[in-house]
Image (cartoon, rainbow, N blue to C red):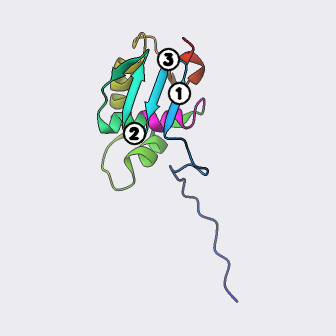
Amino acid sequence: MTPLRPASTEVSALPLHPMSDVYEKGRLRIDFAAYEVWLDNQPVHLSLRDFELLRFFVRSPNRVYERGLILKLVWGNDTHVTQRTVDVHVRRLRLRIERDPAAPELIVTVRGVGYRFNDRALAP
């Protein structure tokens, strides 16, 4: 008889169902296969890590993520970075995709917790 093992507590960054290669909502379009982003029909140039962070957010809109979990799911377990790294990349991403980075509508800070992606703000 095989002994029972406890269920894994690991969280996977991979979706449970296949995702489209293109995300399109309102004024934002992302081609995941080509690593291309357009906002208001204009190309947006992102670093690879910023692209991965944006992909992470759009695949789980309106869900709040703690910085530590974002680090684990986007950067991985074997990367030695601090939670402040998430803040730096969110700030850089906001500079490129927010209408007003000083008053973000898309990547919203949940004070004392982390961040969430507000896809309702994508309306034209």
Look at 31% across and 29% down and name the residue there: 46
Q: Is residue 25 visible?
A: yes
Q: Is residue 114 visible?
A: no
Q: Tell me the residue that label 1 is attached to.
A: 24
**Image quadrant assignment for residue 8:** bottom right
Which residues are drawn in magenta?
Answer: 54-62
Look at 60% across and 29% down and name the residue there: 62
- Is 24 situated left or right of 50 in this image? right
**SS for dot 2:** helix
Q: Position of residue 22 (x, y in %)?
A: 49, 35
**SS for dot 3:** loop
| Alpha carbon separation for disc pair 3 and 2 | 19 Å
| Contact check, label 2 and label 1, Cβ < 8 Å | no
| CA neighbours of label 1 inside 10 A, class few (<14), some (14 to 19), many (20+) | some
Instruction: Residue lying at the far bottom in this picture: please name it.
Output: 1
Q: Position of residue 96 (x, y in %)?
A: 35, 20
Q: Is residue 34 above or below residue 119?
A: below
Q: Position of residue 16 (x, y in %)?
A: 60, 52
Look at 40% across and 23% down and name the residue there: 38
Q: Tell me the residue that label 3 is attached to.
A: 27
Q: Amino acid at mark 1?
A: Glu
| Magenta run includes residue 101 | no
| Alpha carbon separation for disc pair 3 and 1 | 8 Å
Q: Amino acid at mark 3?
A: Arg
| Magenta run includes residue 57 | yes
For the N terminus, the quadrant is bottom right
Look at 68% across and 78% down and name the residue there: 4
Q: Tell me the residue that label 2 is attached to.
A: 52
| CA neighbours of label 3 inside 10 A, class few (<14), some (14 to 19), many (20+) | some
Q: Is residue 26 above or below residue 75?
A: above
Nearer to the camera, 69 or 48: 48
